[in-house]
Image (cartoon, helix red, strand yellow):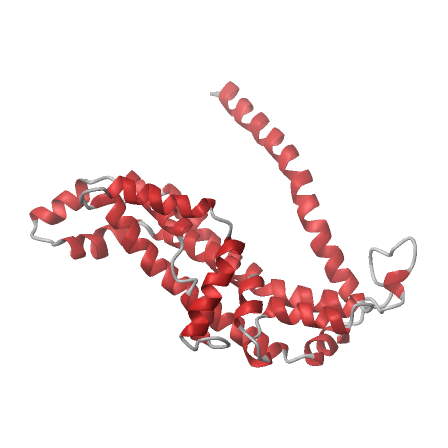
């Protein structure tokens, strides 16, 4: 027992030694971005560059966020991201359940056909998508911005692979009690799939929050700009003022950090308990 504990502690130390440099490499740029946001525009140009501001300037955040209507950018991005996440979770769970549990002719071939879409660069689809929403009169509207993002092939693949690993015993027991396919899906499969659903929701939210190219093409007015497009416009106005740019960037990243830290307990902790429920 002691040798096993020593071996486990040794592996823990080795793992920590490997993870620590990666953590530092990941955190240092973010911390320097915060430090730069608190400097004045002349201090950041010094050589060698200072790592800590001599005198913090938190007013940079207020000045940067009021230079453009960032409050509107954040509202538009939040509506866009939340609607897309809800749509992707609904469509992905239903499609994934059909591919994992329902039996119909050509099911596996259709699934492979779905996966082949992942090999198509999204840039190739930008013009057809724009032509469709333009014909519908949805350019510069929430409908045009959101509708093309409601289906995620990656989300369908993720949940389908998760559903396949779920034991069928509970589903069979529910069917013996008279449950239909919808009841099995809603009352049995979905409660067991919370870790996978949380993972899909978090990744979908991050993907949409940092979306730039499609919102840039699908919208025209300042009211429909998302945060990333707003930061690009801000960069054009203040391309020499690095503290303002870093202040806007830090503010744009904060919602992602909050969502990750709130949701991580679902797809880190509960994933170990799924098979026991």
* Quadrant of the drawing holding the C terminus: top left
| The quadrant where residue 71 appears | bottom right
The residue positioned 60% from the left and 79% from the top of the image is 222
* Image position of 58 with respect to 201: above or below: below
Residue 34: give x, y in percent of width and height.
73, 61
Q: Residue at x 62, y 69 (%)?
A: 229
> Residue drawn at (45%, 75%), measured in percent from left and top?
142
Residue 219 pos. (x, y %):
54, 74
Name the foreground residue: 74 vs 269. Answer: 74
Which residue is found at the position 48% from the left and 67% from the top? 130
In this orientation, does residue 161 appear? no
User: Could you tell whether 28 is left or right of 52 in the image?
Assistant: left
Residue 221: x and y in percent read 58, 80
Of residues 164 and 272, which is closer to you in this image?
164
Q: Quadrant of residue 243?
A: bottom right
Question: Which residue reaches farthest right?
Answer: 47
Which of 231 and 274 lies nearest the eye of the viewer?
Answer: 231
Residue 159 as seen in the image, left or right of residue 186: right
Q: Is residue 189 visible?
A: yes
Asked if residue 62 lies left or right of residue 182, the reply is right
Horizontal and vertical percent for residue 145?
Answer: 47, 70
């Amino acid at each position: 027992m002691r040798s096993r504990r020593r071996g486990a502690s040794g592996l823990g130390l080795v793992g920590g030694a490997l993870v620590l440099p990666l953590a530092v490499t990941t955190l240092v740029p973010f911390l320097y971005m915060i430090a730069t946001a608190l400097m004045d525009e002349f201090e950041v140009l010094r050589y060698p560059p200072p790592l800590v501001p001599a005198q913090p300037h938190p007013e940079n955040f207020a000045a940067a966020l009021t230079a453009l209507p960032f409050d509107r950018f954040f509202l538009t991005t939040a509506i866009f991201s939340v609607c897309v996440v809800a749509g992707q979770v609904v469509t992905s769970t239903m499609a994934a359940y059909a591919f994992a549990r329902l039996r119909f002719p050509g099911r596996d071939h259709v699934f492979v056909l779905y996966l082949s879409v992942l090999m198509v660069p999204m840039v190739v689809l930008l013009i057809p998508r724009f032509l469709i929403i333009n014909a519908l009169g949805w350019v510069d509207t929430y409908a045009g911005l959101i509708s093309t993002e409601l289906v995620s092939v990656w989300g369908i693949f993720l949940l389908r692979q998760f559903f396949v690993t779920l034991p069928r015993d509970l589903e069979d027991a529910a069917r013996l009690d008279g449950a239909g396919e919808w009841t099995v899906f809603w009352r049995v499969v979905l409660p067991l799939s919370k870790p996978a659903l949380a993972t899909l929701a978090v990744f979908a939210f991050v993907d949409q929050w940092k979306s730039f190219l499609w919102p840039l093409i699908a919208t025209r007015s300042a009211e429909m700009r998302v945060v990333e497009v707003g930061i690009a416009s801000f960069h054009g106005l203040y391309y020499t003022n690095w503290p303002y740019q870093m202040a806007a960037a830090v503010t744009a990243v904060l919602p992602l950090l909050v969502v990750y830290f709130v949701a991580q307990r679902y797809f880190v902790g509960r994933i170990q308990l799924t098979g026991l429920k």
